[in-house]
């Protein structure tokens, strides 16, 4: 009796399973909030992914059209709630561009310092949560231990830990505090008494000194971990052409090898803040990449974020130095009744997750006639379905996680 | 780097005055108005022409120009209309431009008859979700869009929230509004 196959396609057809629709989310832990993915699967293979958004939609744009810009600032906090400072900054700069306001050196230095520290905190969550998506718990705890200290420092500056509303049109709400108690987390980690009184910038410097050597530990824990590499390298490959066409920005774009960062390539009102600072823009491909990694895969996107943390620490250190000698007031008056000119402007800034844009149309009254917030994650998430097709079900969290989306910003 | 006047000049040479129906080069972000029928051709030209290479669609949104407040309406400078606004930039040349397409608020002034604008999904894939959002919130129909469904609001939502005369629903599936 022969068991030789006549035509392998016939057998393949016979054992083919039925397609199944699997609903992932909106309460799935690895969909980063309330994203719902509808997967059309054949066994373990995903044929189609349809993202369903809008679970956090509150029409922040409509709200913005009924409020004066300083009143809209708290709503921008709640867009990308992991990087509230950067959201505040983008919106405030757009308003300043519209009314033609110029800020003092001190206000600009404070903004660079706070925004870059916000980027560190945001990328720490991005890294920790990505580890969690892939099934390792430790990086998440480590990242939150570090982030806790950043939040303590932000709390000393503005009183809030998540929704800061600190950077407002005209500057910032407060100056950096001159003397604070050492944040308890930092005191415990550096074996100091929590009653120690230091200046805010000293506490920050101590934290950065402590954080910098830890980054190497994250690389050992994740970046060079064989299991992590197997789950990320060569998966979810996003070509540079596709990234550009889909309007991807931030680490997703740079992970695909496009050398573009608004801190260097943006509009003058934004790049002017970063003039005189020395920093690099990490762009894939990397020398440190494992042999399995290809340009634009999950690993590259993750590594761009890790490298950006190093650069942001550099920027914060330079900003601390500049702050000591910066002149001027930390804020200019921007009244609630300030009339917006009959004109319109659009400004994008480099937020941790990509380019967040604000489009404002003034009509001579104090409220903008049209307030539009263009989300970076909205574009980044749109590549999910082309990236995921043909991969295994278990790879979907790895691909979505590498895009590092925050649903608050997508749904607005 | 190419300035807005040069871009406008090149577009007029290529497409004529009827397609490039207006511009405001004095605005903070200069904009060029394009006739609805020409937007796909103009986009394709700007996307691929060596001098411009606008390969990044930063933002696409709709705005509703209607001033419902009678006090403010006296000083309001615009006739009622809706606009589709395209913010473009180029990775290669590092320049930016804004395009606008002006449409009537409703077709034939019949409330509920959404105006249509040709879709630019074939030029930039980013337009896909942004056009769905503009349809959802501002109520602009994009002809030629592969999948024009609501994206942020539920599919059975009524009205388009960013219209200036939008009225908040009093009831939605047993949930009381207002």
Image: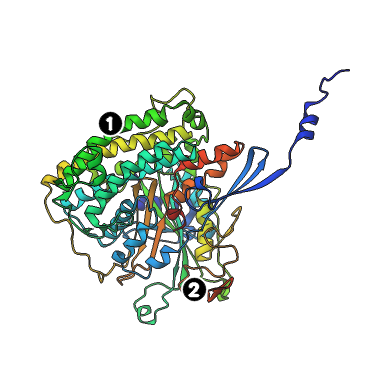
Residue A260 appears left or right of A213: right
> Which of these two is toward me, A408 or A72?
A408
> Which of these two is toward me, A172 or A348?
A172
Quarter placement of the C terminus of chain A:
bottom left
User: Which color scheme is applied?
Assistant: rainbow
Q: Are marks 2 and 1 in contact (CB under 8 Å)?
A: no
Query: In the current view of this chain or complex, which residue is farthest to the bottom?
Result: B70
Q: Residue at x 29, y 67 (%)?
A: A340
Q: How many marks do you count on the picture?
A: 2
Q: Where A320 falls versus B178 (above or below)?
A: above
Foreground tag (2 vs 1): 1
Q: According to the image, label 2 marks what residue?
A: B166
Q: According to the image, label 1 marks what residue?
A: A213
> Which of these two is toward me, B32 or A399?
A399
Q: Position of residue A116 (x, y in %)?
A: 28, 44
Chain under callout 1 = A
Q: Where B178 falls versus A343 (above or below)?
A: below
Q: Position of residue A248 (x, y in %)?
A: 45, 44
Residue A412 appears left or right of A351: right
Q: Position of residue A137 (x, y in %)?
A: 44, 38
Q: Residue at x 50, y 49 (%)?
A: B126
Q: Quadrant of residue A75?
A: bottom left
Chain under callout 2 = B
Q: Quadrant of residue A253?
A: top left
Quarter placement of the N terminus of chain A:
top right
Residue A326 appears left or right of A302: left
> Which of these two is toward me, A214 or A87?
A214
**Which class describes the residues within 10 Å of circle 2: few (<14), some (14-19), or many (20+)?**
few
């Amino acid at each position: 009796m022969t068991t030789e196959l006549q035509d392998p396609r016939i057998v393949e057809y016979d054992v083919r399973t039925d397609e199944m629709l699997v609903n992932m989310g909106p309460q799935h832990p690895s969909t980063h909030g309330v994203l719902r993915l509808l997967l059309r699967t054949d066994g373990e293979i995903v044929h189609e992914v349809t993202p369903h958004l809008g679970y956090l939609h509150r029409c922040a744009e409509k709200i913005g059209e009924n409020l004066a810009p300083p009143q809209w600032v708290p709503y921008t906090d709640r867009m990308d709630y992991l990087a509230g400072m950067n959201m505040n900054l983008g919106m405030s700069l757009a308003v300043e561009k519209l009314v033609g306001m110029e800020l003092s050196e001190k206000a600009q230095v404070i903004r660079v310092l706070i925004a870059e520290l916000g980027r560190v905190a945001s990328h720490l969550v991005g890294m920790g949560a990505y580890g969690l998506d892939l099934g390792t718990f430790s990086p998440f705890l480590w990242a939150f231990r570090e982030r806790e200290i950043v939040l303590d420092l932000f709390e000393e500056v503005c009183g809030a830990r998540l929704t800061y509303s600190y950077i407002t049109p005209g500057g910032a709400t407060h100056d950096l505090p001159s003397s604070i108690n050492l944040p308890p987390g930092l005191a415990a980690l550096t074996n100091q008494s929590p009653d120690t009184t230091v200046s805010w910038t000293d506490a920050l410097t101590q934290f950065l000194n402590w954080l910098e050597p830890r980054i190497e530990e994250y690389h050992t824990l994740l970046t060079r971990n064989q299991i992590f590499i197997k789950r990320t390298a060569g998966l979810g490959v996003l070509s540079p052409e596709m990234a550009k066409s889909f309007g991807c920005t931030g680490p997703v774009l740079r992970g695909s090898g496009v050398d573009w960062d608004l801190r260097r390539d943006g509009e003058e009102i934004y790049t002017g803040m970063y003039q005189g600072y020395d920093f690099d823009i990490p762009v894939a491909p990397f020398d440190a990449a494992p042999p399995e990694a290809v340009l634009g895969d999950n690993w590259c996107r993750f590594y761009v974020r890790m490298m950006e943390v190093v650069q942001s620490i550099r920027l914060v250190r330079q900003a601390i130095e500049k702050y000591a000698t910066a002149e001027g007031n930390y804020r200019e008056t921007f009244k609630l009744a300030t009339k917006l000119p009959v004109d319109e402007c659009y400004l994008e800034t480099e937020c941790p997750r990509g380019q967040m844009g604000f489009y404002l149309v003034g009509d001579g009254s104090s409220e903008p006639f049209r307030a539009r917030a263009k989300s970076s994650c909205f574009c980044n998430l749109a590549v999910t379905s082309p990236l995921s097709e043909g991969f295994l079900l278990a790879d979907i969290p790895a691909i979505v996680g590498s895009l590092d989306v925050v649903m608050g910003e997508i749904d607005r | 780097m190419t300035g807005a006047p040069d871009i406008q000049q090149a577009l007029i040479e290529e497409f004529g005055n009827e397609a490039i129906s207006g511009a405001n080069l004095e605005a903070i972000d200069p904009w060029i108005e394009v006739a609805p029928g020409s937007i796909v051709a103009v986009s394709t030209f700007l996307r691929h022409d060596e001098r411009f290479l606008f390969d990044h669609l930063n933002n696409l949104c709709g705005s509703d120009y209607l001033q419902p407040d009678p006090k403010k309406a006296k000083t309001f400078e615009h006739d009622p209309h809706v606009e589709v606004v395209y913010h473009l930039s180029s990775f290669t040349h590092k320049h930016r431009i804004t395009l606008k397409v002006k449409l009537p608020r409703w077709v034939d002034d019949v409330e509920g008859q959404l105006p249509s604008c040709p879709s630019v999904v074939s030029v930039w894939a980013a337009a896909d979700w942004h056009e769905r959002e503009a349809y959802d919130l501002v109520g602009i129909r994009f002809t030629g869009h592969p999948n024009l469904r609501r994206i942020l609001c539920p599919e059975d939502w009524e009205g388009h929230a960013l219209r200036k005369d939008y009225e908040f629903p009093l009831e939605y599936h047993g949930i009381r509004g207002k």
